[in-house]
Amino acid sequence: MEHELLFRLIPFAIIFFLMVIWEILAPKKQLIFGKKRWPANILIVVLDAIIMRLILPFGAVGAAIWAESNGIGLLSLLEVPSFIIIMIAVVLLDLIIYSQHVIFHAVPVLWRLHQVHHADQDIDVTTGLRFHPVEILVSMFIKLAAVVMLGVPALAVIIFEVILNGMAMFNHSNIRLPKAIDSLLRLVLITPDVHRVHHSVVYQETNSNYGFNLSVWDRLFGTYKAQPELGHDQVVIGLPEYQHSPTYNLSWMLRLPFQSKVQANNPVNKA
């Protein structure tokens, strides 16, 4: 679609800078390394974007246009207004992302990739950008398959990706929300306090709160945990095996999936 890149980049930049300002004005938790992590966390997302443009330049929007032009996908069978199709598609894609996240924790070879995200010893807006390039590629292939199978309209793909990127930055942000507002928002959405639990070094907490946008999936499938055991001020962020590693180093991040022997990050595999 024309101007697709602008439709995605402008909201991305606005949300990123809003979260940065919010983190400065009302931080939730004192960080260990703080902005020392920013160069690597930002450079890896730039690397991700370059690799994606080189390998899959058409992206999920291109797949959606192709599926739509060929009448492929389950949603094409529904005879309802287009805005309802778009709403259904966005919700279904959110469920798929939730399911993918659970799988990336449960399957050892995929956890190798995803642990790069979890190894960050602080959690702030840049953590929401920190994913290994191979994980981004695998995730995109899953998204492409889902878009084609469902017949997701191109506009729904753009809307979903804007929401996904924006919510990833929001719920990873080190911001303080009033308890009343957090309690209200978490009934529907994944708030920073909800997602911070997921980045705890306690494995039972790491394996909870998988959602990125809607909180309904964690509640529905029994993976919701309201608070970390030690409280948000004392919770330790990251992975226990990498607490003394240079997790803020880009080279270390890129090598990590290929140099460590790991199990799936699943409570049944941990003491």
Image: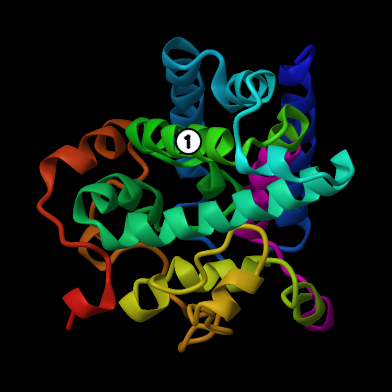
- Residue in view at x 44 percent, y 30 percent: 44
Q: Specify the quadrant that holds the C terminus.
A: bottom left
Residue 16 seen in this snapshot: no
Q: Is residue 176 left or right of residue 131?
A: right
Residues packed near mark 1 inside 10 Å, few (<14), some (14 to 19) or many (20 plus): some
Residue 233 seen in this snapshot: yes
- Residue in view at x 27 percent, y 48 percent: 110
Which colouring convention does the figure follow? rainbow
Q: Position of residue 66 (x, y in %)?
A: 61, 18
Towards the viewer: 179 or 85: 85
| Type of amino acid at the residue the image marks with label 1 | Ala
Residue 143 magenta-drawn? Answer: no
Q: In this view, does 234 lie to the left or right of 156?
A: left
Q: Is residue 207 left or right of residue 254?
A: right
Please provide the residue range marked out in magenta: 159-181
- Residue in view at x 68 percent, y 18 percent: 69
Prevailing SS of the magenta stretch: helix
Q: Where is residue 268 in the image (x, y as percent from the top left)?
A: 21, 79
Q: Specify the quadrant that holds the N terminus.
A: top right
Towards the viewer: 59 or 44: 59
Establish if 53 lies above or below 11: above
Residue 165 magenta-drawn? Answer: yes
Q: Position of residue 117 (x, y in %)?
A: 40, 49
- Residue in view at x 72 percent, y 66 percent: 189
Count of labels in the image: 1
Q: In this view, does 245 lie to the left or right of 177?
A: left
Towards the viewer: 254 or 122: 254
Q: What element carries label 1?
A: helix
Q: Where is residue 52 in the image (x, y as percent from the top left)?
A: 47, 20
Find disc 1 in the rendering and name its residue.
Answer: 145
